[in-house]
Amino acid sequence: MTQPQNDNERVRGYLVGQANKLSLPELVEKVRTDALPLREAAAAIPAERLGDHPIEGEWSAAEVWTHILDMNEHGARSVPAIIARGELPERARDTISGETRAGLKTGQQYYEVFLLRREELLARVLQAKGDEHLDVKINHSMFGDLNWREWLLFMRVHDLDHLGQLRKIAAALGS
């Protein structure tokens, strides 16, 4: 995710403001609902084209999905550890590695792995009071230090950013 600095500040302002304004059920519902179009994106690219690079130098859908899974996993590890123990998480690496997940051959399989882990995270968040260890921050290279509530909402922004990327890949592949 690369954006001009003023966009980064605008997004950070949104994350901080909304994450601290919304109740936990509202926050969870927003994250859950806005990720639903990823299911459609998963089905939009035929399995045999998942590894294709639609434009030279661009990522394949499998590489984008792997990045989505990596960031989803980072949040699913970090947020519960902060809530439960105030454990300082590792710095997020919000970069596409160029790797793909072994054993995942279809967009639907990627989506199912995503959804299972995301729902585990959201269920844990709904058990929280909402004010646990808000002083512990997850660092993002563009948006700075975010508490776990802000990071959860960042995950929504991240999903939407890469949803757009998957849609462009599908269009370029003629899917």
Image (cartoon, helix red, strand yellow):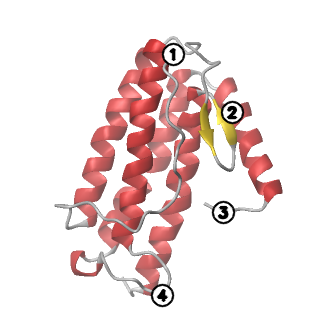
Please say if the residues under marks 1 and 2 sit with CB atoms less than 8 Å apart: no
- Dot 2 lies on which element? helix
Using residue 120 as the reference point, say whether residue 140 is left or right of it. right
Residue 18 disc label = 2
* Residue 84: percent from left, percent from top: 43, 14
Tell me which label, 1 or 2, sits earlier in the chain: 2
Tell me which label, 4 or 1, sits earlier in the chain: 4
Tell me which label, 3 or 2, sits earlier in the chain: 3
Q: Which residue is at the far left?
A: 103
Residue 172 disc label = none
The residue under label 4 is which amino acid type? Ile
Other-residue count near label 3 (Cα within 10 Å), few / some / many at <14 / 14–19 / ≥20? few
**Quarter occupied by the C terminus:** bottom left
Other-residue count near label 1 (Cα within 10 Å), few / some / many at <14 / 14–19 / ≥20? some
Q: Which residue is mark 3?
A: 2
Kindly report the distance in space between the C-alpha atoms of the residues bearing marks 1 and 3. Answer: 30 Å
Residue at x 40%, y 83% (from the top left corner): 53
Residue 55 disc label = 4
* Residue 103: percent from left, percent from top: 16, 61
Q: 120 or 140, which lies in front?
A: 140
Tell me which label, 3 or 4, sits earlier in the chain: 3
Using residue 134 as the reference point, say whether residue 99 is left or right of it. left
Q: Quadrant of residue 102?
A: bottom left
Seen in the picture, residue 119 relative to 45 is either above or below; the reply is above
- Dot 1 lies on which element? loop
